[in-house]
Amino acid sequence: MDIRRIGVITSGGDCGGLNAVIKGIARKAYAKGIETVVIPNGYAGLYNLVEIDNVVVLNAERVSKIEASLAGSEAGHSRVKISKIDDPDKYNRIKKGLEKFKIDGLIISGGDDTGSVVVDLSSQGIPCIHVPKTMDLDLQPYSVGGDSAINRIAVFARDLKTTGMSHNRILVVEVFGRYVGHTAFRGGIGAEADAILIPELPVDFDILYAHMKTTFFARIERSDVRAGTYLIVVAEGLQAASGELLYDESAGVDAFGHKKLAGAGKYVRQQLEKRLKADPEVEAFMKRTGMYVPGIYAVPEVREVTPGHLVRSGHSSAYDVNFGYKTGAGAVVLLCEGKTGNTVTGVEGYKIYYMSTSEAIKRREVDIEELALFESLGTCFGRRPVEFKPELSEESRHVRSM
């Protein structure tokens, strides 16, 4: 394709590595003699492009001001689904905006919702390349932002242990993860959480309570100063035993029609508190460890903590910066080669890997078989542990499984 000017869009949720994607696009385009411009505010900016007075050109001076190591996006975001815009002329309006600024093709970084719009725009004759981005890691390929979120979840959850031990608290940390638990799982393991609850598995709270009681009580009783904590990392898309997600009915839905989730951490806390208060062995434990105060402190305290958007913010991991640079640059090559409607999945050596965006955005869940190994190491997933039965396989290389 004859590409002289590329428009860059980031859409959906912010996360780590996106600024590296932008810089990778701009620098590779510059090396090929192509100009790059920012279309601000995601798909909202694309829809309103025809009314914007000017766009920011990512020349050498402007690109140097972008910090690849910072999370978030210099291009800005919005949650807008083009097909749902109440305007029958929306696609022509978008094309006029692109013509106005002489933009020959788009490179768009986002998750499954963003990718669905890439498929939509491509079907309307608008050349697009997709760079996978989602901290949830629920696309088929690895997505920029995932490693950064995992590291931040691990750090926040691990750091909370100090306050947990100071007060002998049971801590429940609620993190993102609507339909999949990749970041809760990996981040929880990184924090050495005692229990990890993910959307892929309905939780048996009696099993969780039994694991908590055995582990937490033993820690405190072994301690010379009677100090201990118990850490649970739970994804927001927690399933009750019925298989239903816990929705906040008052919160409404987002622009893509998804119900807003809230309350997984609170729900877990309440379930544990209910069992602690009903357990006749708890009072004896509290007295045995010198913690019992009549009418004031009869059962251990359970606290829920929600770091929320802190796990999206701050700095990007080195892995995401590397991945962002490579896939951003790879997207430029794909666009110039006319491989539109595709998602760049990686760059290894001289090879640029890609797949159809319609395939890339299909949901990838946590492989439940991975949990048995960690259950054999003592981690609870809210179910009866499954025996880990190793199968040996000799391979010449290790395939990244994140």
Image (tube, rainbow, N blue to C red):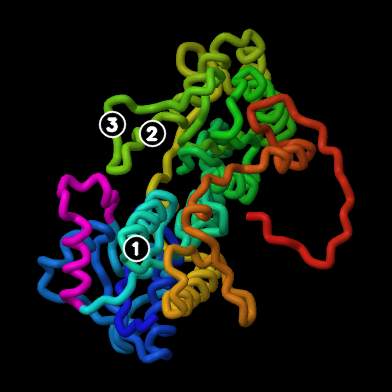
Disc nearer the start of the sequence (1/2): 1
Which residue position is annotated with label 2? 261
Q: Above or below — where is 198 with respect to 296?
A: below
Q: What element does badge 2 sit on?
A: loop
Image point (52%, 53%), residue name: 359
Measured as percent of width and height from the top left, residue 280 is found at 63, 8
Which image quarter holds the N terminus?
A: bottom left
Image point (37%, 91%), residue name: 33
Which image quarter holds the C terminus?
A: bottom right
Q: Label 1 to label 2, Cα distance in Å? A: 23 Å
Tag nearer the camera, 1 or 3: 1
Q: Above or below — where is 324 with respect to 278?
A: below
Tag nearer the camera, 1 or 2: 1
Q: Which residues are magenta?
A: 78-101
Which residue position is annotated with label 3? 251
Q: Label 3 to label 2, Cα distance in Å? A: 8 Å
Measured as percent of width and height from the top left, residue 287 is found at 63, 17
Q: Does residue 388 show up magenta in the picture? A: no
In the picture provided, is 395 more to the left or to the right than 143?
right
Q: Amino acid at mark 2?
A: Leu
Disc nearer the start of the sequence (1/3): 1
Measured as percent of width and height from the top left, residue 390 is found at 86, 44
Using the image, tell me which numbered label, if any, was put on residue 45: none
Which residue position is annotated with label 1? 10
The answer to whether the residue labelled 1 contacts the one labelled 3, judged by CB atoms less than 8 Å apart, is: no
